[in-house]
Amino acid sequence: MPLVPTDSTDPTLLNAIKNWQDNEGWRAFYERYAPRILGHAQSCGLNPDEASGVLQDTMVKVSRYIPEF
């Protein structure tokens, strides 16, 4: 089995979040990516409230488009 680089998303996790009801999958995805998204948004000059908005928008878009991925 090929190794998955630490900076890429495990395909199993991507498959898990295709199911809206997979709370554990979504929790793992959020815990892995929320800090990265917030950090990137803040490094671009957004304040914490704006960065939280970016995080929320990003998660909503992922949830909308992940079934097609």
Image: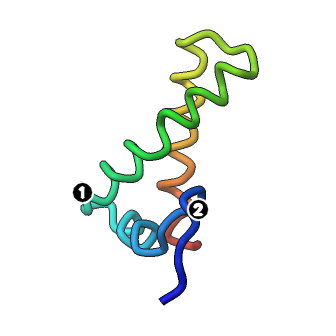
Q: Residue at x 47, y 55 (%)?
A: 63
Q: Label 1 is placed on what type of residue?
A: Glu
x, y (%) of residue 48? 55, 12
Q: Neighbour class for label 1 at 10 Å: few (<14), some, many (≥20)?
A: few
- Dot 1 falls on a residue whose secondary structure is helix
- Dot 2 falls on a residue whose secondary structure is loop
Indicate left or right for 22 with 56 as reference.
left
Q: Residue at x 55, y 24 (%)?
A: 53
Q: How many marks?
A: 2
Q: Single out the residue that lies furthest toward the bottom.
A: 1
Sequence order check, earlier mark of 1 and 2 = 2
Between circles 1 and 2, the one closer to the viewer is 2
Q: How far, Cα to Cα, is label 1 from label 2?
A: 19 Å
Residue ID for mark 1:
24
Q: Residue at x 57, y 41 (%)?
A: 58
Q: Single out the residue that lies furthest toward the right.
A: 44
Residue ID for mark 2:
8
Eyeballing the image, is 32 above or below 67? above
Picture disc at residue 40: none
Indicate left or right for 4 with 21 as reference.
right
x, y (%) of residue 37? 58, 35
How is colour applied across the structure in the image?
Answer: rainbow
Q: Label 2 is placed on what type of residue?
A: Ser
Q: Foreground residue, 4 or 24?
A: 4
Q: Neighbour class for label 2 at 10 Å: few (<14), some, many (≥20)?
A: few
